[in-house]
Image (cartoon, rainbow, N blue to C red):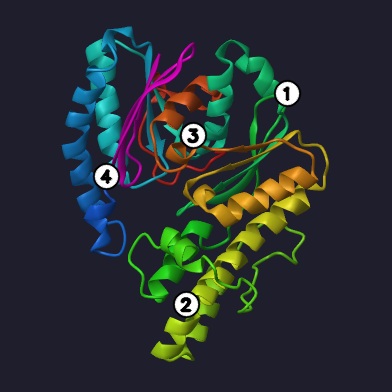
């Protein structure tokens, strides 16, 4: 039984994963309402919220799980906001000492890497290792507000980065596009809502890097293109064209992600395709990946909705799936705000 702790940004989260029973507890406190008025995350406010949230979360956890039954503690130590990560690590160290449990640090992105496999474990905990192996090598995409990473899990369980964004992440592009359109933070889901019923081919937005043979993503040009287009529209035109604008802008993001993923799939050696991170909830993106997986005759694993955002369940699960990717406390565990998926 592994206790997971997550505090990399604006969610305070605790979870307990049991190798035999799956996720026993999965608690998340979101700070969205605190940061909405500022149009984005304010680090000082985020760390203060973590400080206030973890005690009631821990008290709630204690009503559902006997802490004495835990075998280890896994805490996110990067990447993320330094002040927020420090509070999670402090809690992890305190519980490790109080309960005499081993403590390990987990890369937040590796949590996203393994999150699509949680339902597989839930279906057959006793056969998980064998079923997991059948899906390797695995091609996965992490797509969130801060990261866009295409990666592979090899048959030896190594995580290999194939490509990343060279500038803005996909989720950041959606949020910034929404801000240009006058929508509040977080704007990605609002763009999706406004795009419903709109024409995705009405406006021509760039698909960054899709013509390049390099496995890279780029979204800064898309955001700039939207800004220049908006400068030419009157308020009346914007109101009339909002649905089409959002649909076209969203489609440009989805196309950039799916087309580059398809180009890598053509190598023909993967046995499964995965999608994780907050933007994985976008229906248009999910549909595109479903079609891609279907044409490639591959199973598609998408992280469940409550595991796509920042959560502690995926941190505990990553510690279980990927012990070689964790950092033991005795190795000088510390926060790493800029920790890469593969260091």
Q: Earlier in the sequence, mark 2 or mark 4?
A: 4
Nearest to the eye among marks 2 and 4: give it.
2
* The disc label shown at residue 111, or none: 3
Q: Earlier in the sequence, mark 3 or mark 4?
A: 4
Q: Which residue is mark 4?
A: 83
Nearest to the eye among marks 3 and 2: give it.
2
Q: Earlier in the sequence, mark 1 or mark 3?
A: 3
> What residue range appears in magenta?
1-29
In x, y percent, where is residue 23? 43, 22
In x, y percent, where is residue 58? 22, 25
Q: What is the distance, in whole Å, between disc 3 and disc 2 at their CAs?
A: 36 Å
**On the image, which quarter does residue 255 sit in?**
bottom right
Q: What is the distance, in whole Å, between disc 2 and disc 1 at their CAs?
A: 45 Å
Does 302 appear above or below 280?
A: above
Q: What is the distance, in whole Å, between disc 1 and disc 3 at their CAs?
A: 20 Å
In x, y percent, where is residue 231? 46, 88
Q: What is the distance, in whole Å, between disc 4 and disc 1 at their CAs?
A: 40 Å
**4 on left or right of 307:** left
Q: Which residue is mark 2?
A: 242
* The disc label shown at residue 66, or none: none
**84 on left or right of 45:** right
Q: Which residue is mark 1?
A: 134
Nearest to the eye among marks 2 and 1: give it.
2
Does 165 appear above or below 295?
A: below
Q: Are marks 1 and 3 in contact (CB under 8 Å)?
A: no
Of helix, strand and loop, which one carries label 2?
A: helix
């Amino acid at each position: 039984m592994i206790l997971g702790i997550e505090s990399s940004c604006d969610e305070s989260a605790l979870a307990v994963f049991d190798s035999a029973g799956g996720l026993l507890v999965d608690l998340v406190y979101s700070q969205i309402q605190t940061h909405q008025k500022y149009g984005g995350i304010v680090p000082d406010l985020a760390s203060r919220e973590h400080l206030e949230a973890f005690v009631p979360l821990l008290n709630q956890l204690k009503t559902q799980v006997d802490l004495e039954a835990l075998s280890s503690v896994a805490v996110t130590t990067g990447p993320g906001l330094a002040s927020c990560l420090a509070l999670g690590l402090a809690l992890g160290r305190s519980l490790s000492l109080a309960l005499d449990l081993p403590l390990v640090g987990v890369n937040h992105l590796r949590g996203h890497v393994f999150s699509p496999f949680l339902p597989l474990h839930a279906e057959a905990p006793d056969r998980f290792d064998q079923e997991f192996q059948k899906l390797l090598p695995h091609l996965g995409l992490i797509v969130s507000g801060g990261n866009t990473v295409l990666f592979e899990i090899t048959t030896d369980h190594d995580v290999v980065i194939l490509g990343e964004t060279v500038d803005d992440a996909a989720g950041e592009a959606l949020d910034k596009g929404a801000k240009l359109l006058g929508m509040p933070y977080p704007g990605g889901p609002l763009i999706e809502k406004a795009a419903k019923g709109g024409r995705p081919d009405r406006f021509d937005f760039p698909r960054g890097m899709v013509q390049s043979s390099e496995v890279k993503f780029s979204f800064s040009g898309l955001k700039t293109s939207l800004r220049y287009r908006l400068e030419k529209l009157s308020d009346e035109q914007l109101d009339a064209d909002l649905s089409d604008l959002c649909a076209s802008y969203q489609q440009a993001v989805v196309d950039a992600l799916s087309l580059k993923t398809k180009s890598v799939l053509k190598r023909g050696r993967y046995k499964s395709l995965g999608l994780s991170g907050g933007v994985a909830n976008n229906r248009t993106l999910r549909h595109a990946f479903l079609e891609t997986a279907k044409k490639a005759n591959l199973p598609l694993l998408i992280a469940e909705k409550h595991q796509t955002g920042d959560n502690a369940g995926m941190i505990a699960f990553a510690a279980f799936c990927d012990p070689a990717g964790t950092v033991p406390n005795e190795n000088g565990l510390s926060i790493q705000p800029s920790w890469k998926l593969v260091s």
